[in-house]
Image (tube, rainbow, N blue to C red):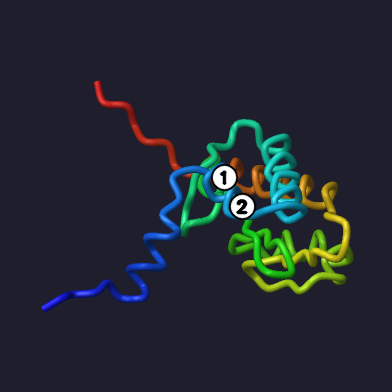
Amino acid sequence: MQVYPSKDQIDMAKTDFKSVDEYQDTFDGEKKARLQQVRDTIRAAAPLAEEVISYQIPAYKHFGFVVYYSGATNHISLSYPFSAALLAEFKTELSKYKVSKSAIQMPDKDPLPVDMIRRIVEYRVKENELAEAAKPQKAKKK
């Protein structure tokens, strides 16, 4: 009897990205260029962050996850469980986008808000650094 892989197994095989380059190579033209612009903006705003693939999309870590991004049919999303403070800080700018606690959808028909992306990433880096500094220090063993 022939055993066929499930649809989930097939989909996972198609999206087992090992790098951000590999992820971005699945896009063409303008979408790929926009994703690269988001990537460049994040890297400039968080130069110490490690670039990884998490949940099969690009992510950046600096004392925990800073931000993720992804491409969809009609938009690019910047995502992470954003704090209430971040959402309040950027409330006016975010009002023109579809926003949840965990994602900001930037439509392809509009110019990318590069300056806002940079400032959101810088804000997230500071949040993570403050959270790390607030953690109790472990005593050194002698």
Type of amino acid at the residue the image marks with label 1: Tyr
**Residue appearing at x 32%, y 27% in the figure:** 140
Snapshot quadrant of residue 77? bottom right
Instruction: State if disc 1 and disc 2 touch (CB < 8 Å).
Output: yes
Residue at the left extreme, as displayed: 1
Q: Which mark is residue 60?
A: 1
* Callout 2 secondary element: strand
Horizontal side of 38 relative to 93 (left or right) equals left
> What separation in Å lies between label 2 and label 1 (alpha carbons)?
6 Å
Residue at the front extreme, as displayed: 1
* Callout 1 secondary element: strand
Q: Which quadrant of the rendered structure holds the C terminus? A: top left
* 138 or 77: nearer the viewer: 77
Q: Position of residue 13 (x, y in %)?
A: 37, 60
69 vs 95: above or below: above
73 vs 69: above or below: below
Q: Residues within 10 Å of mark 1 (few under 14, many from 20)?
A: many
Snapshot quadrant of residue 104? bottom right
Q: Which mark is residue 29?
A: none
Q: Position of residue 88 (x, y in %)?
A: 78, 65
The answer to whether residue 36 shows anywhere in this view is yes
**Residue appearing at x 87%, y 63% in the figure:** 110
Q: Position of residue 1 (x, y in %)?
A: 10, 78
Residue ID for mark 2: 67
Q: Position of residue 57 (x, y in %)?
A: 53, 55
**Residue appearing at x 41%, y 54% in the figure:** 16
Type of amino acid at the residue the image marks with label 2: Val
**Residue appearing at x 75%, y 51% in the figure:** 34
